[in-house]
């Protein structure tokens, strides 16, 4: 999204009215469901892998006609069906199609073929990346315990993210492959603060990583204002941030728009596309 195409937000405006307008626009795009095109990937050049997960990979691609760079999320149909994530993946696609926000990538286009789903999104260069969705370290206790949950789990994940950005590792990190030990620490809310954390940061993370939902910031009567008005954010100009008028404290040095040198290096693997369409019925309306 281009900077000049984004509407400016001001403290004088009716914030609730603005949110309602954005909600209506999002719902219109979300309900304007468009099926994925049959893959014609010859228009792209596949450059390298940016990340890998349980359902597939993310690759850096370049559109040959324009030279534009994109990130393509490639999802295995077989894995989606096996893990019973078809509805979840469909929701992800529709949300990415509907969202328009300065700090969230949106869906440019979507393809499918006999074996895979391809989600094409803007390539965003960062000095560091995190993968939240489905990462065990970010799961809230109520998800692990199979309890009913709502958006309060996102505030828990935000607390984990704040901690990791300050410390460089997860608050519930365990030095082993024992995932059960990790999940147990999460459910107990067991972690320690590094010595470099300020008292304000410790306080904010403490109120976000609450196993008791009635005490978790973001889930209380004041909603996200308990977080935005916290002492750790006292110097933050939220409207300037929303309008992207603030300078980043660190700007990585890059060689160009397609520079992926700050991403981890992965072994490149060719896609194995079946000769016949897999799960045609399940993905007919995708």
Image (tube, rainbow, N blue to C red):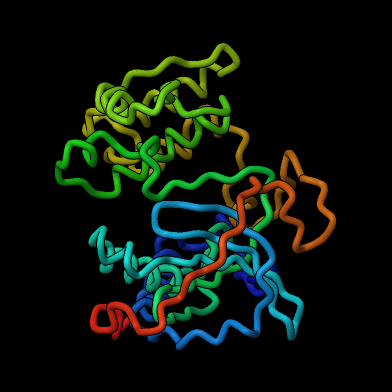
Task: Farthest residue to the top: give it.
Answer: 195
Taking the image as shown, residue 134 lies to the left or right of residue 239, namely left
Task: Farthest residue to the left: give it.
Answer: 147
Residue 274: percent from the left, percent from the top?
41, 78
Of residues 230 and 186, the one nearer the viewer is 186
Residue at the spot 33% in from the left edge and 18% down from the top edge: 190
Residue 94 to residue 257: above or below? below
Residue at the spot 65% in from the left edge and 79% down from the top edge: 44
Q: To which quarter of the image does residue 116 belong?
A: bottom left
Taking the image as shown, residue 104 lies to the left or right of residue 265, namely left
Taking the image as shown, residue 133 lies to the left or right of residue 39, namely left
Residue 193: percent from the left, percent from the top?
48, 16
Q: How many numbered discs sit on the rendered protein?
A: 0
The N terminus appears in which quarter of the rendering?
bottom right
Task: Farthest residue to the front: give it.
Answer: 275
Residue at the spot 64% in from the left edge and 64% down from the top edge: 60
Residue 146: percent from the left, percent from the top?
16, 42
Residue 237 to residue 118: above or below? above
Of residues 246 and 38, the one nearer the viewer is 38
The C terminus appears in which quarter of the rendering?
bottom left
Residue 148: percent from the left, percent from the top?
15, 46
Of residues 9 and 91, the one nearer the viewer is 91
Residue at the spot 28% in from the left edge and 38% down from the top edge: 220
Of residues 225 and 124, the one nearer the viewer is 124
Residue 242 to residue 122: above or below? above
Q: To which quarter of the image does residue 264 belong?
A: top right
Taking the image as shown, residue 262 lies to the left or right of residue 140, namely right
Q: To which quarter of the image does residue 75 belong?
A: bottom left
């Amino acid at each position: 999204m281009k900077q000049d195409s984004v509407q400016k937000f001001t403290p004088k405006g009716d914030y609730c009215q603005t949110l309602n307008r954005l909600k209506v626009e999002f719902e219109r795009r979300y309900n304007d469901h468009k099926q994925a095109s049959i893959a014609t990937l010859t228009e792209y050049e596949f450059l390298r892998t940016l990340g890998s997960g349980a359902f597939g990979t993310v690759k850096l691609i370049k559109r040959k006609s324009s030279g534009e760079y994109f990130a393509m999320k490639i999802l295995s149909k077989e894995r989606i069906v096996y893990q019973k994530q078809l509805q979840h993946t469909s929701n992800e696609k529709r949300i990415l199609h509907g969202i328009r926000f300065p700090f969230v990538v949106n869906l440019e286009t979507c393809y499918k073929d006999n074996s895979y789903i391809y989600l094409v999104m803007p390539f965003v260069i960062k000095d560091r990346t995190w993968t939240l969705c489905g990462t065990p370290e970010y799961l809230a206790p109520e998800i692990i315990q199979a309890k009913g949950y709502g958006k309060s789990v996102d505030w828990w994940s935000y607390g984990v993210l704040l901690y990791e950005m300050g410390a460089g590792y997860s608050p519930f990190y365990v030095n082993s492959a024992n995932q059960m030990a990790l999940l147990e620490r999460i459910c107990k809310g067991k972690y320690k603060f590094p010595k470099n954390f300020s008292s304000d940061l410790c306080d904010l993370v403490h109120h976000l990583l609450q196993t008791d939902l009635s005490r978790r910031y973001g889930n209380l009567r004041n909603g996200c204002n308990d977080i935005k008005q916290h002492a750790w954010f006292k110097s933050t100009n939220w409207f300037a941030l929303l309008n992207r008028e603030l300078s980043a404290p660190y700007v990585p040095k890059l060689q160009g728009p397609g520079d992926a040198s700050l991403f981890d290096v992965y072994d490149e693997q060719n896609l194995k596309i079946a000769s016949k369409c897999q799960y045609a019925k399940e993905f007919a309306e995708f």
